[in-house]
Image (tube, helix red, strand yellow):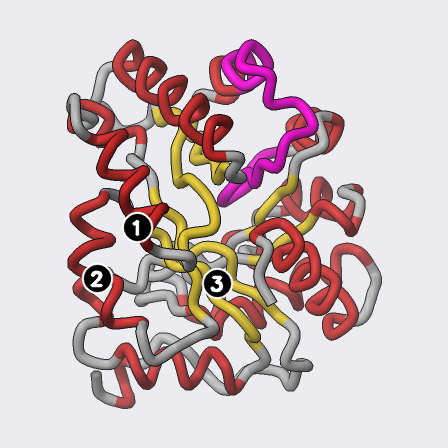
């Protein structure tokens, strides 16, 4: 990738305590410069990155790329828009992967997505429940994807007994009321790049009121780049811009919040 195409700029100096809790670094957009992407991430102050695999086959084909990086951990799950691909053997494949790879620290991202019309809601719900029950049987945290399906997602999570179980609400983009409902259930909220968008005042207001112990930072790379790079490929180093916007909204130093969010993530995923 040429200098003109870079999706990250020199970021503010932060302690080596941050965590990007959600990145898709197996995406083809990283195939030519993964090493440089990871080097930039660690240079701005990330201590760990959580790589999300969206199927057992994605894990099997992509895990070796991260063998040189002990700081990269994994999640594994079937995304709701691909729920129709959850076949008879999928659960066994997920369990097999988890049994043989200690880097897999959570089941996810799983949930509901009514924005994209790729999979019927009934199928999504069925597969969501199956994966929640699998997570319970394996005593694993879950990472939730929820888009335009909050009421159904919350109802299923309540029915399945996930109140006060380890749960991370990935890519939170809602308002204060939703944040309060998530936090009241003992769950974590992960904040992505759109928190930096000037018009996203409601999201910043919501984040300002979330207890610090419930917050994490993410990029969802290569998606959802923060304001300086909107429309370009996102990458983990850009969590620095996320935490700056979060810290400004909360009236605290960015480095302090960076460490708090990192510590939250390390406890949640059981990493160090």
Disc nearest the viewer among 3 and 2 = 2
**Mark positioned earlier in the residue sequence (3 or 2):** 2
Determine the residue positioned at 31% across, 20% down.
127
**For the residue labelled by badge 1, is the local secondary structure a helix, a strand or a loop?**
strand
Q: Position of residue 8 (x, y in %)?
A: 41, 78
Q: Quadrant of residue 168?
A: top right
Give the camera-side residue of 261 and 99: 99
In the image: residue 258, left or right of residue 158: right
Determine the residue positioned at 72% across, 68% down.
259
Position of 39 relative to 50 (above/below): below
Q: Which residue is mark 2?
A: 62
**For the residue labelled by badge 2, is the local secondary structure a helix, a strand or a loop?**
helix
Give the camera-side residue of 197 and 109: 109
**Mark positioned earlier in the residue sequence (1 or 3):** 1
Mark 3 to mark 2 CA distance (whole Å): 26 Å
**Mark positioned earlier in the residue sequence (1 or 2):** 1
Residue positioned most to the bottom? 3
Q: Which residue is mark 3?
A: 226
Q: Which residue is mark 1?
A: 53
Q: Quadrant of residue 216?
A: bottom right
Give the camera-side residue of 64 and 226: 64
Q: Residue 161 in magenta?
A: yes
Position of 257 relative to 165 (above/below): below
Q: Residue 89 in magenta?
A: no
């Amino acid at each position: 990738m040429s200098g003109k195409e870079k999706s990250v700029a020199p970021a503010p100096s932060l302690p080596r305590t941050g965590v990007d809790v959600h990145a898709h670094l197996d995406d083809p957009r990283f195939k030519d410069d993964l090493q440089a992407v990871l080097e930039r991430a660690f240079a701005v102050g990330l201590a760990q990155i959580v790589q999300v695999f969206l199927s057992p086959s994605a894990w099997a084909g992509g895990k070796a790329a991260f063998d040189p990086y002990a700081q990269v951990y994994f999640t594994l799950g079937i995304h709701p828009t691909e729920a129709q691909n959850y076949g008879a053997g999928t659960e066994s494949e997920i369990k097999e992967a988890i049994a043989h790879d200690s880097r897999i620290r959570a089941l996810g991202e799983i949930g509901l997505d009514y924005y994209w019309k790729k999979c019927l809601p009934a199928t999504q719900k069925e597969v969501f429940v199956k994966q929640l029950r699998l997570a319970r049987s394996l005593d694993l945290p879950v990472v939730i994807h929820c888009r335009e399906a909050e009421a159904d997602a919350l109802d299923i999570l309540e029915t399945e007994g996930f109140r006060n179980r380890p749960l991370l609400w990935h890519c939170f983009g809602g308002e204060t009321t939703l944040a309060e409902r998530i936090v009241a259930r003992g769950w974590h909220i992960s904040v992505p790049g759109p928190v930096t968008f000037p018009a996203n005042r409601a999201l910043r207001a919501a984040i300002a009121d979330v207890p610090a112990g419930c917050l994490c930072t993410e990029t969802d790379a290569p998606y959802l780049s923060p304001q300086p790079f909107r429309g370009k490929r996102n990458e983990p180093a850009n969590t620095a811009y996320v935490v700056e916007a979060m810290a400004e909204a909360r009236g605290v130093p960015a480095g302090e919040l960076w460490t708090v969010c990192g510590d939250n993530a390390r406890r949640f995923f059981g990493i160090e």
